[in-house]
Amino acid sequence: MRNLFQQINLKTILIIILFFLLGWQLGHRDVQVKWATYRPTVSIINKEPPQNIDLDFKLFWDTWDFLSRSYFDKKAIDPTKLFYGAISGMVAALGDPYTVFLPPEQQKFSKEELNGSFEGVGIQLGFNKEKRLVVVAPLSGTPAEEAGIKPEDMIVKIGDKDTTNMTLPEAVNLIRGTKGTKVILTIFRDGESDTREFTLVRDTIIVKSVEVSYKQSLSSGEGKNTNSGKKVAVVKLSRFGERTQSEWNEAVSSLLSENVGAMVLDLRNNPGGFLDGAVFIASEFLDGGAVVLQENSEGERTSFRVTRAGKLISIPLKVLINKGSASASEIVAGALQDRGRAELVGEKSFGKGTIQEAQDLSEGAGIHITVAKWLTPNGKWVNDTQGIEPDVKIESSNENLSSGDSEDDTTKDPQLDKALELLD
């Protein structure tokens, strides 16, 4: 009897194990079938790559499907963000910080900036030769300038986000924001041993491209500069945006009516803008000839020449530049220097020698693509550490101060003073 019970128990155990294994196999197969037939809930259309691309996109869609299926936080899976992120990564793979994909919100910011009105702190951004995020220039009269932000300040963090490998649009998106809100920038300044934090309150930034003031030329004698009586128009050109040409024409009409004897074109802290804007401004001072050369990927060069009859071709002229002068402002300065039209006074410029084409995409997105590099009329490429060297090097006022200078000396502008002196 005992042996009979043992046989029955053994059979029972074997049956239980058999059913367990069968259930596990069926369940495992069911999981495999579900994985194999899984499709994301989002409807995907237009999956075909361009006809001239011989590339198997299976890896991309496998990754998309696996991420959608397996990532633990399903609420974080936003198909649109994944889509834009994939495009951004593709563009970033080129390794060019100025070639960027702009999702709709960032595209909106970009257009607002070129239009001259936006909410933020007033910083023009770029990258140094190590591809770290830096300030090209703080805009005049903005929270950034008032807080003491300077050209070439490296932005280490925006809020609590490290900027290493951050794209330009991502940085702009973090810095921009509603008027009255705050953003904290962690800055590293060359020559200092530690970072410093700047808390900036966002405001409505309205950027006027062109401003005109009037000075007297200076005569240097006995260690001091004195007014010599010649009236000089000082034209501050802060950007090359959508309203620059109309503002420029108004400024030129105004200074011509003042019967000025000379002019200073101030391109300091001008981060650039539209290429055709640079050609337009340079054409005001040049009697024909080349303004800038564009070189494509094949090494072929196209000359952009003077486009109109300038009204200021013969007026005595000096040009101010500094480390915040970049892109289109460097094109103007380089053309006037190479063509022998004007001396440059100040510091070496930023060094951005590439041209980007802005293209609108569907659904409000956009892309900026580096399409060529530009060179001065004499064929010099100013990119990265090159920059444009001034004919007369004068450091900015803050760098010129000695321990014996008074606080009032911080308002001095030795670069402008030197230009006025040279115009005497």
Image (cartoon, grey):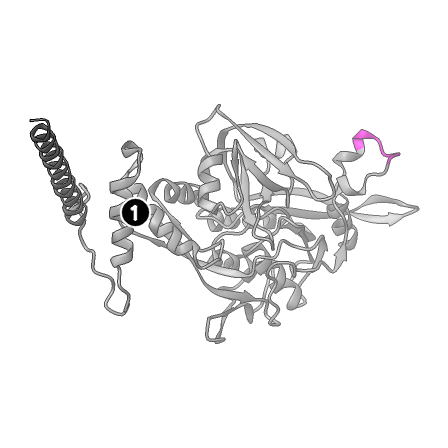
Q: Position of residue 389 (x, y in %)?
A: 70, 60
Circle 1 is placed at which residue position?
A: 83
Q: Amino acid at mark 1?
A: Phe
Residue 116 seen anywhere in this rendered image of the structure? no
Does residue 146 appear to the left or right of 365 in the view shown? right
What residue is rendered at 62% in x and 53% in y? 350
| Magenta residues, start to end | 403-408
Does residue 184 appear to the left or right of 276 in the view shown? right
Q: Is residue 24 above or below residue 377?
A: above
Closer-to-camera residue (342/21): 21
Q: Position of residue 413 (x, y in %)?
A: 74, 42
Magenta residues: mostly which secondary structure? loop
Q: Is residue 297 above or below residue 67?
A: below
Closer-to-camera residue (63/271): 63
Residue 220 seen anywhere in this rendered image of the structure? yes
Q: Position of residue 134 (x, y in %)?
A: 59, 45
